Image (spheres, rainbow, N blue to C red):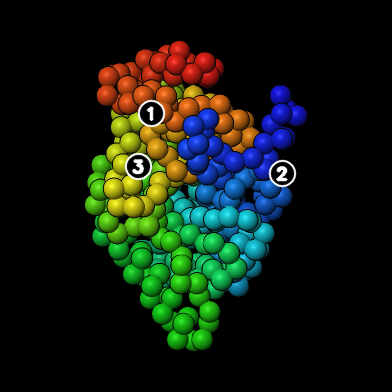
Amino acid sequence: YKAELKTLKTAESVSTDGHKVLLVANIGSPNDIEAIKQNGAEGVGLFRTEFLYMESDELPTEDSQYEAYKTVLENVNGPVVVRTMDIGGDKKLKALPVPEEMNPFLGVRAIRLCFQREEVFRTQLRALLRASVYGDLKIMFPMIATVEEFKKAKGILLDEKAKLVAEGVKVSDSIEVGIMIEIPAAAVLADQFAKVVDFFSIGTNDLIQYTFAADRMSSTINYLYQPFNPSILRLVKNTIDASHREGKWTGMCGEMAGEALAAPLLLGLGLDEFSMSATSILAQRKRIRELSYEESKKVAEKATTELSTMEEVVELVKAETGIEG
Ligand code: PEP
Ligand code: MG
């Protein structure tokens, strides 16, 4: 089985009936590039940049960030989706203190913190813009809840771009700018977001937590962590359909994208890009290459319209595809 997986390193991620998707990797630092290449990643679907901020007690400088982004862009063949920093929630930082709150996951986190400390956000955006000429950079904002938040973040990005251009610095003109869909409000309003963003990436880790109002770290209520509940599948479907109606694309960078049973469901819902930890890629590629897109569509349709529980969905997928969980 392992030898067979190895042969898929350079294979396309394509269903038996010719429907192509992209299988890309989640990374946290330039040090991860070698591993994602070894595992046949077709690009990077999520660069979690907060790890650059957690390496030391001081904030990373514009130049040190620029070097990290440049290294990743130069060494990855394919698109590289860089997520602006997601500090807050469980990720605390000496140099970037957030107020003590009752519910940190519902408080000042990610883009919310970036708006409070705009100079820190601007530094990151400048580093990204300067590095953009070295590869296929896409910029993604985390924890977006409203259309205004996206417009504000994009406005700051364009402002920094204009400043750099005025300074004579070369900046790519083809950077796509998208958002994570990880707050239910954004998933529900995906049709409106799709008019203003270039792409979506669904963060199921948080989307599930916020949809079920159940802490993703809690072991006592982990029965509520339900990626295959039809409610989640409907939010995923709504997001993908909305993006396609506007000629945009949708990826997924939460853990769900690499799960065995998710392969037929996500393929059938029309997901364009699956981003996961490097070690899941080859196995997921093998599954996708053994699935029919047309059959997967039927499974996904049934799961999102006729079923009411996660158990029913899991049973359906196992029965229709032979995939074991
Ligand atoms: C997610 O929420 O699914 C996600 C990919 O982001 P993180 O796990 O970094 O919160
Ligand atoms: Mg998240």
Q: Is residue 56 visible?
A: no
Q: What's the CA distance linking mark 2 and mark 1?
A: 31 Å
Q: What numbered label is drawn on residue 38?
A: 2
Q: What's the CA distance linking mark 2 and mark 3?
A: 30 Å
Left or right? Give the position of 61 relative to 308.
right
Q: Residue at x 25, y 42 (%)?
A: 188
Q: Which residue is mark 1?
A: 297
Q: Are marks 2 and 3 in contact (CB under 8 Å)?
A: no
Amino acid type, callout 2: Gln
How far across and how far down the image is residue 81, in percent?
A: 51, 55
Q: Is residue 11 visible?
A: yes
How far across and how far down the image is residue 192, in percent?
A: 24, 52
> Counting residues from the N terminus, which is met first, the one under dot 1 or under dot 3?
3
Left or right? Give the position of 182 relative to 9.
left
Secondary structure found at label 3: helix
Q: Quadrant of residue 132?
A: bottom right
